[in-house]
Amino acid sequence: MSEVSGKAWDTALFKRVMQYAKPYKLTFTITGVLVVLLAILGPIRPWLIQYTIDEKVKDFDAEGVLHLTLIMIGILIVEAIVQFYQTYWANWLGQTIIKDLRVQLYQHVMSFRLKYFDRTAIGTLVTRTVSDIETIANIFSQGILVIIGDILKLIAVIGFMFYTDWLLTLITLIPIPILIVATNIFKKTIKKAFQEVRTQVSRLNAFVQERVTGMKIIQIFNREKVELSRFEKMNKLHRNAHIKTVWAYSIFFPVVEMLSAASLALLVWWGTKSVLEGLTTPGILTAFIMYVYMLYRPIRQLADRFNTLQMGMVSSERVFKVLDTDSFIEDEGVEEKGKLNGEIEFENVWFAYEGEDYVLKDISFSVKPGETVAFVGATGSGKTSTINLLGRFYEFQKGEIKLDGVPIREYDLENLRSNMSVVLQDVFLFSDSIYNNITLNSNLITEAEVKAASKRVGAHDFISKLPDDYHYDVKERGGMLSVGQRQLISFIRAYVHNPSILILDEATSSIDTESEALIQQATEVLTEDRTSIVIAHRLSTIQKADKIIVLEAGRIIEQGSHQELLALNGHYKKLFELQFKNEAVA
């Protein structure tokens, strides 16, 4: 879409936006009818005033003046009612459409591979999902329908003017060609300005989101002044982008006012002369003065409406760019086995995040149901990459991975992941209650089951001492709890979902010794009678594993039990001795 430019690009993009109005065709049609009705009602009043002055006032017909006045009041009341419903339904349509679009966008984003989030700033996605989509609503509530109404009103006004006095109309419309040129220049200028505004808003949101999230790092390293300076520069760019729009407005609106005054001056000059010469009537002159105001007001409003439409189109381009992103895992699997046995087999697996820069090279190993397998190795050796492939969070390029003898790509993705639970080193908790963080709002898990699991894992004591115990709000990212407490909650979360395969990604690497004892107890509970994969930082926690796999630079260099690897007198033994030597010194 970004390669398409000019009018064709705008048309294609606009047609795509309008596709979202199809389910609400009736509402759109009704709103359109109300818009047309408003366009017709407006010019009737000047015509009635003209008739009143020329036919009733001239003949001193007070009763006739009263009747026509009542008719005009009635038209005003009808116009007000129509305006109310037109505004209500237009805004209802806009909000309903973006509700559907926001759900579609959010659902699409949730299906993306983790690779997409590695490359995309979270603040940018927040901008697309919230503020950009909100701007799209204005296409329907303040944009296309209202623009059509303003254009129809212009046509109706000019039609009434020509019908009444074609020569006076031509005199009045002399400044219009200049206005058309000015409007076209304004249109192009304001479009570029609003594109820059949306770009700067996105950058500013991404910057603020990242810095607020990483505030601890900023304060630890005394980077407040540096980050403030960077923020001031970005904020200045944001301001300058808005000033460009203000500059365009500040030139265009005075031009419209000047041309409106010029039309009125020409009207008064020629109209007065015509009245004195008997070529026209005072009623027509009065009506034309009203027509001039009715003519230029929609033109000025059209500029505003067009700006609104442009902002919506710019935002829709950004939203559709995300919707057009093909970064989701293709879920073509149909195999659904329910509860898996937990047999895992890697056969000559190769994996790269980019191109052929492989981080896993010819990985082969097998895990029997109920076994515990541990991965050890230096940072960057490929431990976490291995477990990411198992849940298809990333896709491998060569080889095969099987579960219970079936290639994982043949499984239905939801069924595959429902058989796995992962406990990460960096535990993420939502700003919600402990209960909801454990169940993840599943209706299939009861509070009684959560409490029973907490007692088995060893977390019930600390949870019950909190205000509101299991309904205690842990705040953003679980900030009200310690690292060890957050880790225990993640263990309960994994336990209550009863997975066939449990994955522990360095779950004890960043907690204190006291918490480690609880985590170790929880680990024994979780790994009981289920296939478990453990990425270990502390080798003392994996000595009981059925198999230990040693990785280096993406390759398996050793595998066996703890005693077998020590007997090899190889890489594992060096790691083991070095770690225990360091712990002894500490």
Image (cartoon, rainbow, N blue to C red):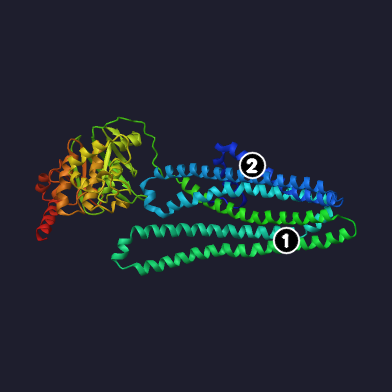
Residue 479 higher or lower than 36, as above or below: below
Question: How many labels, in total?
Answer: 2
Residue in the foreground of this view, choosing between 546 and 154: 154
- Amino acid type of the residue that numbered disc 2 sits on in the rendered structure: Gly
The quarter holding residue 227 reads bottom left
**Residue 571 in view of the camera:** no
Residue in the foreground of this view, choosing between 191 and 43: 43
580 horizontally vs 369: left or right: left
Residue in the foreground of this view, choosing between 77 and 346: 77
167 horizontally vs 494: left or right: right
How far across and down, in percent of the image, does residue 233 sit?
45, 67
Residue 220 higher or lower than 142, as above or below: below
475 horizontally vs 174: left or right: left
The quarter holding residue 277 reads bottom right
- Amino acid type of the residue that numbered disc 1 sits on in the rendered structure: Ser
Badge 2 or badge 1: first in the primary sequence: 2
Residue at the image position 78 percent from the left and 58 percent from the top: 172
Return the residue at label 2: 32
Return the residue at label 1: 260
